[in-house]
Amino acid sequence: MKLLDSSIWLDHLWEANRESSELIESSELLGTAIVSLFEIERRLRQLEVSEEKIKSALQFIEKRSIIIPLNKEIIKQAVLFSLKYKLGTIDALIYASAQLFKAVLFTADNDFRGLPQVEIISK
């Protein structure tokens, strides 16, 4: 499984990034941490995207990927990753979600650079 960070979804939906789009349009099994939905909706609201487009974007993500819910195991691991790699809370939760599902995390966020099982896609 490949777990996509919110940056990949936003690159595909609003910036038409070729690498992100190829990944999303592939037939591969994709996952998305539930906290990424928070980041995506927050960013779209900052950009003053219409309610209809926000709803459509979130529905697309939920149809195209498996949404990984938070649980105690993810939270516990996220605390450790946050301290070990100096990640912010949401980044640590996303990274822990990928690690516990044995997924490679795909992101355009340099905060994850150098971490195991992470692929950085350039913008």
Image (cartoon, helix red, strand yellow):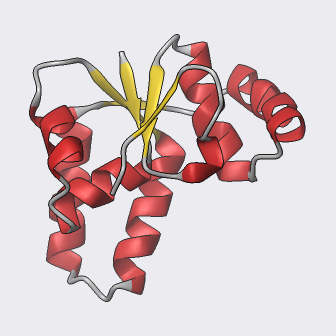
**Residue 40: quarter of image:** bottom left
Tell me if 87 is positioned left or right of 23 in this view.
right
Foreground residue among 123 and 78: 123
Q: Position of residue 83 (x, y in %)?
A: 89, 38
User: As displayed, is residue 71 above or below residue 35?
Assistant: above
Q: Residue at x 55, y 20 (%)?
A: 117
Location of the N terminus by quadrant is top left
| x and y, in percent, of residue 66 in the image | 32, 27
Residue depicted at 15% across the width and 60% down the height: 16
Q: Residue furthest bottom?
A: 48
Residue at image coords 58%, 38% = 94
The image shows residue 73 at horizontal and vertical percentages of: 73, 20
Q: Residue 67's quadrant in the figure?
A: top left
Relative to 15, residue 17 above or below: above
Return the x and y of residue 43 as percentages of the image width and height: 42, 73
Q: For this rendering, which residue is in front, 39 or 56?
A: 39
Determine whether 115 is above or below 73 in the image: below
Relative to 50, 77 lies left or right: right
The C terminus appears in which quarter of the rendering? bottom left
Q: Left or right of 120: which side holds 31? A: left
Q: How many marks?
A: 0
Q: Residue placed farthest to the right in the image?
A: 83
Q: Is residue 76 above or below residue 58?
A: above
